[in-house]
Amino acid sequence: MAIHVMRRQRVDRAVALRELREDWWQLRKAVQAQRPEAVLWRLQRVQKTKGMHRLTLAEMLVGSGTIR
């Protein structure tokens, strides 16, 4: 049972990192388009993902593709 839960958490975290990568990309586009409401919405979404999945800053940067 514990193994199944750990695998699911890993899968959920992988999906969250994939979505985070897309959110960073959309955030960058919103900044370039000078759309402050879109920027704030994306930042809130990133913060929510970070809290829900207990991601560290390093995991977020690597997951978003900022650092390779």
Image: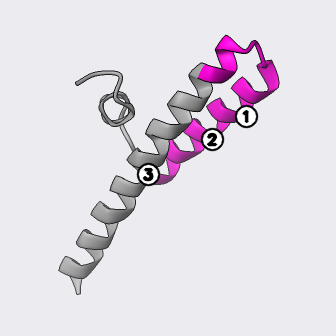
Residue 51 magenta: yes
Q: Give the residue displayed 29% in from the left and 76% down from the top.
A: 5
Q: Give the residue displayed 52% in from the left and 29% down from the top.
A: 25
Q: Where is residue 39 in the image (x, y as percent from the top left)?
A: 70, 24
Q: Is residue 54 visible?
A: no
Q: Disc 1 to disc 2, how far (Cα)?
A: 6 Å
Q: Is residue 42 visible?
A: yes
Q: Quadrant of residue 61?
A: top left
Residue ID for mark 2: 45
Q: Where is residue 28 in the image (x, y as percent from the top left)?
A: 57, 20
Which callout, 2 or 3, points at the residue further toward the start of the chain?
3
Report the predominant secondary structure element of the magenta stretch: helix
Q: Which element carries disc 1, helix, strand or loop?
A: helix
Q: Disc 2 to disc 3, how far (Cα)?
A: 11 Å
Residue 30, placed above or below residue 41: above
Residue 50, placed above or below residue 62: below
Q: Disc 3 to disc 1, how far (Cα)?
A: 17 Å
Q: What segment is highlighted magenta in the picture?
A: 29-52
Q: Where is residue 34 in the image (x, y as percent from the top left)?
A: 76, 12
Which amino acid, mark 2? Arg
Q: Which element carries disc 2, helix, strand or loop?
A: helix
Which disc, if any, is residue 67?
Answer: none
Residue 12, placed above or below residue 24: below
Which callout, 3 or 1, points at the residue further toward the start of the chain?
3
Residue ID for mark 3: 16
Quarter of the C terminus within the rendering: top left
Which amino acid, mark 3? Ala
Describe residue 12's horizontal placement relative to residue 24 as left or right. left
Label 1 neighbour load within 10 Å: few <14, some 14-19, many 20+: few
Residue 56 magenta: no
Say whether marks 1 and 2 touch (CB < 8 Å).
Answer: yes
